[in-house]
Amino acid sequence: MLRLTNLYILVISLAVLIACQTDKGSHHISNELLVAETVLYEVENYDIANESQEDDPALQSHYKVSYPKITDQISEETLNQINSHIYTFISDSEKQISEAPDVEQLAHKLFKEHAEVYEDREWAPAWLVNKTVSIESKVGVLITLSFNEAVYTGGAHPNSYTIYKIFDLSTGNEVKLYDIIDQTNKDQLNQLRLDEFIKQKSELLPDGDWKSYVFEEQFEPKGAFNENENLKISADGFEFYYNSYEIAAYAFGPTQLVIPASKIKPLLRKDSPYYNSLNNLK
């Protein structure tokens, strides 16, 4: 009986130890997910129209939302951290929120404001808010999400912007540019960006005509051009995104600068998951 009791205690102890180790390692992702090109997800879609304008669909205001719901096997904490960024963006919240917003409530708030603005007018232009979160790319444990908002609430033209965010699927943490690039290589990175910018714009607008569109002060060492950390990463390299008005006039539109992995690799931090992933791909 004593031996059986001791054996029982040993089995229980081993079970507890394994459980603890599993819990501690819950942030590690499977090898299958590590080498996959993307994660499994479903898309949550909303398109809410202003029912008070249903007699004329062309004048109906719309509130649209689309975002991914990751279904892959990652830790709950990682999933919650990524979802928090999505929910905060959709809600226009100044603080991080952890629960999915009530999209219908957000839509009705917009429609109420529309009614108040055009209360005394016989005709009112339709308003549109369209918020889209998309999974753009995945490299090893790093995944890039785009957060795009297109808005028209009157005025000369609609406005839109796109923000990219990179997340580590093994921790849920947001990864910034200088978590990937060695900070000491910042000047080299900026030169790569400037060379690509000049090449791209010179091909579109020869004879230096593009220079009349840019904000010169934003190309100073501490200007928006050099300080930009809005990027998407892939196995092919980096893509930096500059929104309209950020470095040039609205007519210039947004700017996308692609820097190939071959030029980026010498600038990387050796402890970056991106660096390790590039090595594994070669």
Image (cartoon, grey):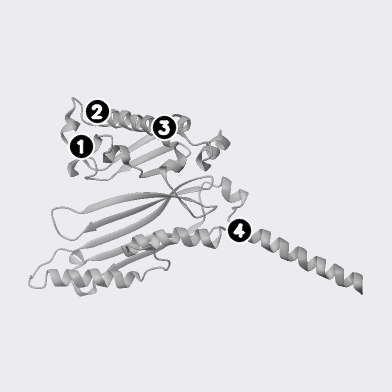
Q: Residue at x 34, y 69 (%)?
A: 103
Picture coordinates of residue 138 (x, y %)?
Answer: 48, 46
What residue sits right under mark 1 in the picture?
A: 217
Q: Nearer the viewer, residue 147 or 85?
A: 85
Q: Is residue 69 visible?
A: no
Q: Nearer the viewer, residue 53 or 99?
A: 99
How packed is label 2: few (under 14 Cα within 10 Å), some, or many (20 or more)? some
Picture coordinates of residue 27 (x, y %)?
Answer: 58, 56
Q: Sequence order check: which comes first, mark 3 or mark 2?
A: 3
> What is the quadrant of residue 197 in the picture?
top left
Asked whether, in this view, residue 48 is left or right of residue 260, the answer is: left
Q: Sequence order check: which comes first, mark 2 or mark 1?
A: 2
In the picture, the quarter occupied by the C terminus is top right
What residue sits right under mark 2 in the picture?
A: 202
Q: Sequence order check: which comes first, mark 3 or mark 1?
A: 3
Q: CA distance from mark 4 to mark 2?
A: 50 Å
- Residue type marked 4: Ser
Q: Which mark is residue 26?
A: 4
Q: Single out the mark in the foreground, 3 or 2.
A: 3
Asked whether, in this view, residue 87 is left or right of residue 77, the answer is: left
How packed is label 1: few (under 14 Cα within 10 Å), some, or many (20 or more)? few
Picture coordinates of residue 107 (x, y %)?
Answer: 28, 69
Classify mark 3: helix, strand or loop.
helix
Q: Sequence order check: which comes first, mark 4 or mark 3?
A: 4
Q: Residue at x 11, y 69 (%)?
A: 118
What residue sits right under mark 3 in the picture?
A: 185
Q: Residue at x 46, y 40 (%)?
A: 180
How packed is label 3: few (under 14 Cα within 10 Å), some, or many (20 or more)? some
